[in-house]
Amino acid sequence: MKIPDSTNHKPVIISDNYGKVDGRFANNTDVKALTLGLTPLNDEGKAHISANLWGYTEEEWSGQSEEIPLHRILDLSILLCSALNHFSEAYRYDHLYDPQNPVIDRIGLQGNAMTVAVCTDNDEINEDIKLFNKALSDNGEMIGERLRTLSRLLEDLGYS
């Protein structure tokens, strides 16, 4: 199933099998995918990266934007970290990913694995992935500060 582009979010990195690892809702959830994507360009001509939870009911996609259970926030963080890891080496590929193998990670969760991939259903992926990479770079200091803080807090909690 192709996730649609919306006016506010164009998917670039996707976990399209998320329904299999959605915490206590796994295999019985309306959330079928997580995405990291681009929001419209701002006045300065810079794209922003946003996250989205995609529900699928009765043959229709919907981007949810209300209450988010804590495990989904953590899953979005896992998706983001996987994407950051990919983009740290993406310069090796002509299109910042391997079109023959768009899966960039498989992360074991709850007896299954969350697939992380470049969203090749995006008709403008070759342009959007460059904008996505630039937005990551432009926000690297801010993202890095938060990741270092998160890392420190996780270590303090015994998750090192």
Image (cartoon, rainbow, N blue to C red):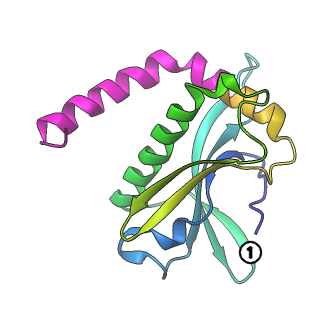
Residue 133 in the image, given as x and y percentages of width and height: 66, 26
Task: State the predominant SS element of the stretch in magenta.
Answer: helix
Residue drawn at x 68%, y 31% is: 132
Most extreme residue toward the right is 123
Determine whether, in the image, residue 93 is placed left or right of residue 103.
Answer: right
Asked whether the viewer can see residue 41, the reply is no
> For the residue marked with disc 1, what is the amino acid?
Glu
What is the tally of numbered marks visible in this picture? 1
> Residue at horizontal 82%, vertical 35%?
126
Residue 8 x, y percent position in the rendering: 72, 45
Which residue corresponds to mark 1? 60
Q: Where is residue 157 shown, x and y percent of the image?
A: 13, 42
Determine the secondary structure under disc 1: strand
Q: Is residue 40 left or right of residue 24?
A: right
In the image, is residue 26 part of the stretch drawn in magenta? no
Q: Hey, which quadrant is residue 45 in on the image?
A: top right
Q: Quadrant of the C terminus?
A: top left
- Which residue is pictured at 55% across the width and 25% down the height? 88
**Number of residues whose C-alpha sits closer than 10 Å to that of mark 1, classed few (under 14), some (14–19) or many (20 or more):** few
Is residue 144 in view from this perspective?
yes
Q: Which stretch is magenta?
A: 134-160
Q: Nearer the viewer, residue 50 or 81?
A: 81
The answer to which quarter of the image holds residue 47 is top right
Q: Is residue 64 above or below residue 76?
A: below
- Side of 26 where 101 appears, left or right: right
Tell me the residue at 79%/27% (across/down).
94
Residue 156 on the magenta segment: yes
Query: Can you say which quadrant of the picture contains the N terminus?
Result: bottom right
The quarter holding residue 75 reads bottom left
